[in-house]
Amino acid sequence: MAAAVRSITGGESFQRAFRRGGRAWQDFLQLRHLKTEGPTRIGVVLRASTFKRAARRNRIRRLIREAYRMLAPEVAPGYDLVFVPASEPAIDHRDYVLAVLARLLRRAGVYAGQVPPYPEGLKRNRRAPVESPPGSADAAAVSEGKAAKQRARGRVASRGNSG
């Protein structure tokens, strides 16, 4: 069974992590991390303006805590870690949150373990499942469509000879 997770309690610890701590981003999740004395503690901050329903906030909080619990043995001791979801996760699944959290902790320099892969069928930084593999005709058509929109807006030079 995984070890218990220590929580950050009291507003001062959260404020200290936000003011003096480093920050890192991965997909939908921001991390504020501060080196401290003692065991590693975590906190999850969810804005009611972003996540309107309390049940949804609690579900996301549980997903993050469970994913952290699985990674905790490989996390460096002596940190306050504050996770701040900026939006809904792309997929409401523990394996996805676990993969995002591992990458985020690695980026912050506090995780030394293996980074699990993203769940099958989910493309990184996307909210929808992958429908066509890269390099296929559909993917090329989507890329060409985006480029055409940008050219129409004057952001990208048009293709062809300018002369």
Image (cartoon, helix red, strand yellow):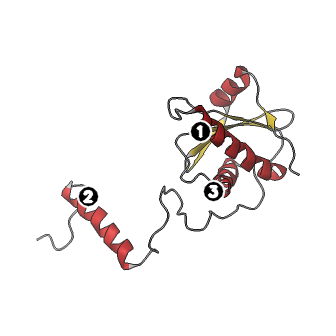
Q: Nearer the viewer, residue 138 or 56?
A: 56
- For label 3, the crowd category at 10 Å Cα-Cα, with few meaning under 14, some 14 to 19 and many 20 or more, is many
Q: Quadrant of the C terminus?
A: bottom left
- Identify the element where label 3 is drawn: helix
**Which numbered dot is residue 96?**
3
- Identify the element where label 2 is drawn: helix
- Identify the element where label 1 is drawn: helix
- Find disc 2 in the rendering and name its residue: 150
Q: CA distance from mark 2 to mark 3?
A: 32 Å
- For label 1, the crowd category at 10 Å Cα-Cα, with few meaning under 14, some 14 to 19 and many 20 or more, is few
Q: Kindly report which numbered mark, 2 or 3, lies closer to the viewer in this rendering.
A: 3
Q: Nearer the viewer, residue 60 or 11?
A: 60
Q: Nearer the viewer, residue 161 or 123?
A: 123
Q: Pick whichever of labels 2 and 3 is earlier in the sequence.
A: 3
Residue 77 place in picture, x, y as percent: 84, 42
**Which numbered dot is residue 69?**
none
Amino acid bearing label 3: Tyr
Amino acid bearing label 1: Arg
**Which numbered dot is residue 56?**
1
In the rendered image, the vertical position of residue 12 relative to residue 137, given as above or below: above
Q: CA distance from mark 3 to mark 1?
A: 17 Å
Residue 47 place in picture, x, y as percent: 56, 30
Residue at 55 percent of width and 67 percent of height: 121
In the rendered image, the vertical position of residue 10 relative to residue 72, given as above or below: above
Amino acid bearing label 2: Gln
Position of 102 with respect to 4 (left or right) is left
* Residues tagged 3 and 1 counted as in contact (Cβ below 8 A): no
Position of 10 with respect to 25 (left or right) is right
